[in-house]
Amino acid sequence: FCAFYNLPIPCRDNFDDMSLAEQRYWRQRQYGAYLAAAGTISACDGSVKKAMGAGAVWLEPDGEAHTSVCKVAGPHSSFRAECAAMHLAVTGPAKDSMLTIFTDSMNVITALQAWDQAEFVREMEWQRNSDVVMAILRAINQHQNPITIVKVKSHCVVDLNERADILAGAAVGADNEEVETLFTPPPPDECFV
């Protein structure tokens, strides 16, 4: 079970021109929006530069924060990076908790909403980035409680989303082997070469 919303999380473009009291007000409004969500709250973001990266951050109901990052292999696209980030956001938190995910990618939300359309599923293996979309759908189906996906504005000082953005950028720039690379596509089928 997965629900999709386009709810406005209270946000500001930046805090540079605000007093500390105003900053505190806006951060408390965001925190209130987080508290309105039951269970685990997660945010995800992808990044594309010379390489692709994905990051997710989530807050457990007890307030403990966790993060996950990866490099993303395959065809270079922001959609693929955002999908990998969504996969991290779904697979990272415990499966036995309700989950609310904040994302700034309407394309990922649209792709996930289309999954129940017969022509989409029937043609899935022929679609670009289907390996990542199918991995997200499998992870959603393995989750034991409802998942709510919320569209938020990007770069709007929504704290969790901004942290996920920083993690995704760091994954892109990581030159070490400590950051796992996910979604390496299989070699092309010989009949298509």
Image (cartoon, rainbow, N blue to C red):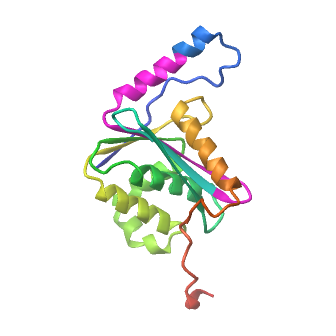
Vertical position of residue 62 compared to residue 103: above or below: above
Residue 174: % across, % down = 68, 56
Along the viewing direction, whichever of 171 and 80 lies nearer the viewer: 171
Residue at 62% across / 55% down in the picture? Answer: 53
Residue reaching furthest to the right: 50
Residue at 41% across / 36% down in the picture? Answer: 64
Give the left or right position of residue 128, taking residue 133 as reference. right
Q: Quadrant of residue 4?
A: top left
Vertical position of residue 145 compared to residue 6: above or below: below
Q: Is residue 46 magenta?
A: yes
Which image quadrant: the C terminus? bottom right
Vertical position of residue 58 compared to residue 110: above or below: above
Residue 29: % across, % down = 47, 19
Q: Is residue 186 magenta?
A: no
Give the left or right position of residue 182, taking residue 13 as reference. left
Q: What span is colored magenta in the figure?
A: 26-52
Vertical position of residue 17 compared to residue 161: above or below: above
Residue 102: % across, % down = 46, 39
Residue 146: % across, % down = 28, 45
Residue reaching furthest to the bottom: 191
Q: Quadrant of residue 61?
A: top left
Residue at 40% across / 51% down in the picture? Answer: 90
Give the left or right position of residue 7, taking residue 23 as reference. left
Give the left or right position of residue 1, taking residue 9 as reference. left
Q: How many marks?
A: 0
